[in-house]
Amino acid sequence: MILVNYLAAAALLCTGLYVLLTRRNLIKIVMGLSLMEASTYLLMVSLAYRAGSTAPVLLSPPAGKTAGQLAHGNVADPVLQNFCLTAIVIGVAVTAVFLSVAVRIAQHYRTLDADKVRAMRG
Amino acid sequence: MTAKTTIADGRAPAGAVNREATEREPRHRPWLGALLAAGLAVALGAAMAGIPREHAPLPRIARYALDVALPKWGLTEPVNEVVYGTRGFDTFGETFLLLAAVVSVILITRSREPRRGYFGESTAGAREQAETDPAAGTDAAEREARAAERREQAGGPAALETPDATPLGSPAPETAETMTVVVRTAIRIALPILAVAGLYLVAWGYSPGGGFPGGAVLLGVLLLAYACYGRRKISRVVRPALLETIELAGAAAIIMTELLGLVLKGSFSANWLPLAAEQTPLSGGIAQLFSGSELIEVGTGLAIAVFALLGMGHDWARDDGQDGDGSRP
């Protein structure tokens, strides 16, 4: 029933998009973006899952098995786990950029309401 | 009308606080947002029905990574092999995405005047600078500002203010830099364990992703030290010049590691180091070198971003009476 995870990731992404489209507080917009980021982490980790699989670790195989057999056995997908963990670090750094822009806007315009930041209107 | 008079009388009706909070929440076209989000949900739901589930065979690239991890790289951690070996070029790109984000944070948070540290110099003299007449003599506020400045210049642990000196039951001093003895003791015990565990897992290649989680652990160590001992204690380590130098040294090490593969083996990010026995610090060839450089890069990069954000207070634009409607040129 990994489909539930996929749908939860889709729901998270849509929640983030809804926040992004309707809220006008810059901090909440950044929170919406973080929600959308988190949905991709959930989707990638769920995609890596296989029923009854072990973690992709070749350390100390069980008795009577070699590491090579372990590698050909039922393991979770290491490539998607790689994507997920690099995405987390990049996500943190990008969120820091968003937040520093939000602080600068607050300091310059004295408001966090994106509707009131007139200079950004076309 | 009646509601307005009640508020004007000072007798707020029941639930007024909540209603006011929701009324002030700025929103923009909720129906349109809901429509678009629902549309995306339908499209994603349809797409999700078709993607591989838990019984699908592993993709070829995943099987390949599992196959070569031990024989070709000597790594027992296939995730590490993917990060620094099979998809090393991808990680290389992400490293510089991270660097670009850190440079953006530095540029955006940069203060108007050059500063040596992230904290402090703006707060000590702020009140004094606002003084109109320097010959007007000293009042209590100025004496306090001068004392704060002297304390900051002196530095050192002797100047550290802690809430421990005040008698039990009284509120903690507001200017205290450190947390209470309970927190400090707990963090003093946890900090070395966290730091050693993080570095050990990276050095032996046991942590999936190597330097990425390791760098996050380093940031955690710095933030814990900052939270419990205050900024003065960490200001010798956490200063822009030092962190930025280390960060770029890490980036240069990553470029060298990957480029030497091109020079020595004819392929970018090829392994040019001899493989040691597995489960030792040198087992992965350049994977471990890449991982260690990534640890430096990620740890200092995240630290720069976080401390630049923490230190960007007190740089407000001058309030020229136009109030907060945002209609600034």
Image (tube, grey):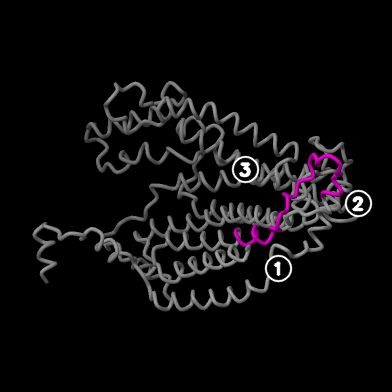
Q: Nearer the viewer, mark 2 or mark 1?
A: 1
Q: Amino acid at mark 3?
A: Gly
Q: Nearer the viewer, residue B321 or A102?
A: A102
* Disc marking residue B52: 1
Mark 2 or mark 3: whose residue is earlier in sequence: 2
Residue B175 percent location from the top left of the image: 34, 32
Judged left or right of residue B40, residue B135 is left
Looking at the rendering, the stretch of residues picked out in magenta corresponds to: A42-70
Report the quarter where the C terminus of chain A lies.
Answer: bottom left
Placement of B34 over or under A67, stated as above or below: below
Question: Please, what secondary structure does the residue beneath circle 2 have?
Answer: helix
Report the quarter where the N terminus of chain A lies.
Answer: bottom right
Q: Amino acid at mark 1?
A: Pro
Quarter location, residue B170: top left
Q: Which residue is mark 2?
A: B265
Which chain does the numbered disc 2 sit on?
A: B
Which chain does the numbered disc 1 sit on?
A: B
Q: Nearer the viewer, residue B145 or A98?
A: A98
Residue at left offset 45%, top offset 71%: A21
Question: Please, what secondary structure does the residue beneath circle 3 have?
Answer: helix
Residue B171 percent location from the top left of the image: 28, 30
* Disc marking residue B299: 3
Residue B212 percent location from the top left of the image: 66, 47
Mark 2 or mark 1: whose residue is earlier in sequence: 1
Report the predominant secondary structure element of the magenta stretch.
loop
Q: Are marks 2 and 3 on the same chain?
A: yes
Q: Are marks 3 and 1 on the same chain?
A: yes
Q: What number of labels is visible?
A: 3
Mark 3 or mark 1: whose residue is earlier in sequence: 1
Q: Mark 3 to mark 1: distance in Å?
A: 35 Å
